[in-house]
Image: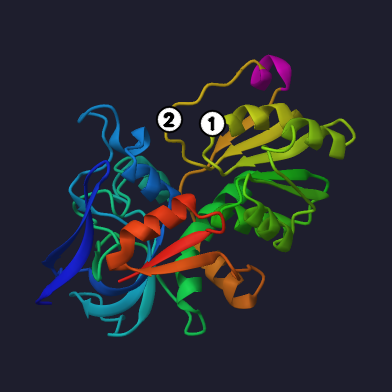
Amino acid sequence: MKGNMKALVSYAPYDNRLEETGIPSAGPGELVLKVLGCGICAGDVKSYHGGIRIWGTSEENRYIEAPVTGGHEFFGEVAEAGEGMGEYKTGDRVCAEQIAPCGECDFCRQGKYWMCTGSAVYGFKQHIQGGFAEYIKLHKNSIIHRIPDTFTNEQAVLIEPIACGMHAVELADIRHDDVVVIAGLGAIGTSMVNLARLCLPKMVIGIDIKEFRLDMGRKYGADYVLNPAECNVAEEIHRLTGGDGCDVYIEASGSPRSVSQGLESLKNHGRYVQMGVFAEEVKADWNVIGDGKELSIRGSHLSALTFHSVIEGIESGLIKTDGLISHSFELKDWEKAFRTAEEEPAAMKVMLVP
């Protein structure tokens, strides 16, 4: 394709620039999409603020390859199909998983591509520019999914974040007699309340400091919601469970204080899943894990093999999406969009529309 487009390029912390750049062309095995929407991830906001997980402490341990166009929660319609991609026609609506795996490392060969040791997430690497742009090129190693015609643009943008939440819920191994806690009720956390409820546990508890999100947690199936600014969460969880504590604590807030809160809230032999991304290193009393409660600790990374199930779940109505996209902005208004995602009390998922 020929011509220019607008793209939001990250150069350094606090240095995003809306620029004009060339529209990419599709090579063999590649697609070029006209982007129809791209969600702002909490990781995008933390990256803007220089989060150590993205920018590291030096060039040697830096993940991001700046300057680069951000955005990994995107979908669009096919604008150009490269050689070997004849199954896709102009106008087809698709999304791609957030990682383009190398296909060669041990994890990729084992089918665990989301743990690829050559980790390349859209919007952070030079060879896979992200969706904060009018067009995006899908890398030949991309894992592409078709989007049903019945999906709204908002539902299409939510596929990636909900898939990340589904993977975390799977890792929690929720059983019918469990008390499950979801800490952090943003769009992903609220969706995890829905997903956890589908496992038919004894009780689901949601935690957040924003009243609007607590209300969303109730609407999505939480039996109880707790605000850490208004109560001692661990004490309340023990009270609600007859002194035992919860079986499962899924950390989706990215707040360092939530870690100790979770370890304190869990019962003996409880299961802790870390899904949220922290902007800094976290300290906790690890004696609680071993010598204290013999807890199981699991990390949740990206979305694993869940995209197909999420798409089917949304299509069937089992996975709710109402209200998860709270705000939508044009790409030119990206600064207001980022501020809204970070500061607006009623913000859930904020979407940029090129």
Q: Indicate left or right for 217 with 111 as reference.
A: right
Figure disc tally:
2
Residue 195 is situated, as x and y percent measured from the top left of the image, at 66, 58
Q: Is residue 144 visible?
A: no
Question: What numbered label is drawn on residue 280?
Answer: 2
Please say whether residue 235 is one of the residues in the magenta stretch.
Answer: no
Q: Quadrant of the N terminus?
A: bottom left
Q: Is label 2 in a helix, a strand or a loop?
A: loop
Dot 2 surroundings within 10 Å: few (below 14), some, or many (20 or more)? Answer: few
- Amino acid type, callout 2: Glu
Q: In terms of sequence position, does the residue under pointer 1 or pointer 2 come before the other?
A: 1
Determine whether label 1 and label 2 are within 8 Å by CB: yes
Report which residue position mark 1 lands on.
256
Q: Indicate left or right for 140 with 161 as reference.
A: left
Q: Which residues are magenta?
A: 288-293
Is 119 situated above or below 95? Answer: above
Residue pictured at 63% horizontal, 67% vertical: 319
- Amino acid type, callout 1: Pro
Residue pictured at 39% horizontal, 60% vertical: 337
Overall secondary structure of the magenta stretch? helix
Residue 164 is situated, as x and y percent measured from the top left of the image, at 51, 53
Q: Indicate left or right for 144 with 305 as reference.
A: left
